[in-house]
Image (cartoon, rainbow, N blue to C red):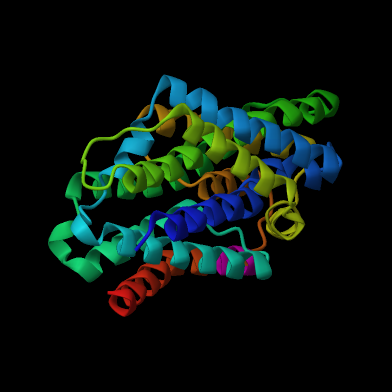
């Protein structure tokens, strides 16, 4: 199998990620009326691009975690093709129904499913533990910090909070690029260093990943914004700003600790923590999709590996 198909699939995953994940960064300011949708999308696209490039210049810990998640051996191209195909399918389904699922968790699930199809011994425990810790921590920390900041912020400062949401959205979009960009660069390193076993990436790869993610963000994501910022919970400028702060701090800490986490999960948890009255029906639907992500994407990748081998 040649490199081109798997590289094209990875490009598609990055594009879909910007399309479906990045809108979570701007859900609060758009839904609370702070920013019009076109301006918010431009802001998110630029900050996503800078997040990928700037973070890789400082630390590549998250990328290395994804790079070392499994030993695919001589079947690496087949396994990666299956994992990426499963991720694209899941992302498109999520967008179709306006559900803010996690592309990064779908990718990790796909990689795990592909590795399991080759043998359980192909998975590496250390990186998997980091993924599990990040999954739990991002939800708990996001919700706790969203609630904490909402309780600490004084009332009757609506003008300040409206302006602050713009800065918060920019930070969240930047950190989305920092987190998810590194995950995809970790997979790209797997593709480009087949058989070498050593993590290595050219600077041009970082820029290409950043540009694709930004392009995906520019395509929009209105349905997901409606779900996160309008249907899931009603946000005012104060609670929206608290959610931005909670998500940004959660993502920054997890990135510094080298934990691969989902921007979608961190932001949704922060919004739930900061919001006054979450919609139980929408929250239940989100929870069901999140629980399904790992088994569904893992199973799709597992089957695809068996078919392709």
Horizontal side, residue 67 vs residue 182: left or right: left
> Residue 266: image x %, image y %?
52, 44
> Residue 12: image x %, image y %?
56, 56
Residue at left offset 80%, top offset 26%: 163
Q: Nearer the viewer, residue 41 or 10?
A: 10
Residue at left offset 68%, top offset 58%: 232
The answer to which image quadrant residue 248 occupies is top right
- Residue segment shown in magenta: 281-286
Q: Nearer the viewer, residue 170 or 56?
A: 56
Q: Is residue 211 visible?
A: yes
Horizontal side, residue 108 vs residue 289: left or right: left
Report the residue that reaches farthest toward the top. 58
Q: Is residue 243 above or below residue 124?
A: above
> Residue 278: image x %, image y %?
66, 56
- Magenta span: helix, strand or loop, mainly? helix
Q: Nearer the viewer, residue 85 or 175?
A: 85
Magenta stretch encompasses residue 62: no
Q: Is residue 91 above or below residue 246?
A: below
Residue at left offset 53%, top offset 69%: 89
Residue at left offset 70%, top offset 37%: 44
Quarter of the image for the N terminus: give it. bottom left
Q: Is residue 296 above or below residue 200?
A: below
> Residue 52: image x %, image y %?
53, 32
The answer to which image quadrant residue 299 occupies is bottom left
Quarter of the image for the C terminus: give it. bottom left
């Amino acid at each position: 199998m040649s490199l081109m198909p798997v590289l094209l699939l990875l490009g598609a995953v990055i594009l879909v990620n910007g399309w479906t994940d990045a809108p979570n960064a701007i859900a609060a300011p758009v839904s609370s009326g702070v920013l019009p949708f076109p301006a918010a999308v431009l802001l998110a696209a630029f900050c996503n691009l800078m997040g990928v490039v700037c973070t890789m210049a400082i630390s590549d810990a998250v990328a290395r975690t994804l790079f070392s998640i499994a030993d695919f051996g001589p079947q690496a191209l087949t396994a990666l093709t299956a994992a990426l195909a499963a991720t694209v399918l899941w992302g498109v389904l999520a967008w179709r129904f306006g559900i803010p699922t996690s592309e990064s968790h779908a990718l990790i699930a796909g990689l795990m499913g592909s590795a399991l199809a080759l043998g359980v011994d192909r998975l590496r425990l250390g990186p998997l533990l980091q993924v599990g810790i990040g999954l739990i921590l991002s939800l708990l920390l996001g919700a706790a910090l969203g609630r904490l900041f909402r309780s600490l912020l004084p009332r009757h400062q609506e003008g300040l909070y409206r302006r602050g949401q713009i800065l918060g959205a920019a930070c969240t979009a930047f950190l989305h690029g920092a987190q998810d960009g590194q995950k995809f660069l970790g997979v790209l390193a797997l593709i480009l260093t087949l058989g070498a076993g050593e993590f290595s990436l050219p600077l041009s790869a970082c820029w290409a990943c950043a540009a694709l993610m930004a392009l995906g963000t520019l395509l929009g994501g209105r349905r997901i914004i409606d779900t996160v910022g309008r249907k899931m919970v009603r946000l005012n400028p104060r609670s929206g700003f608290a959610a931005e702060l909670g998500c940004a701090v959660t993502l920054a800490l997890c990135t510094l600790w080298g934990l691969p986490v989902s921007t979608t999960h961190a932001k949704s948890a922060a919004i739930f923590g900061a919001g006054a009255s979450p919609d139980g029906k929408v929250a239940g639907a989100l929870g069901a999709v999140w629980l399904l992500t790992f088994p569904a994407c893992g199973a799709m990748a597992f089957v695809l590996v068996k078919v392709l081998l």
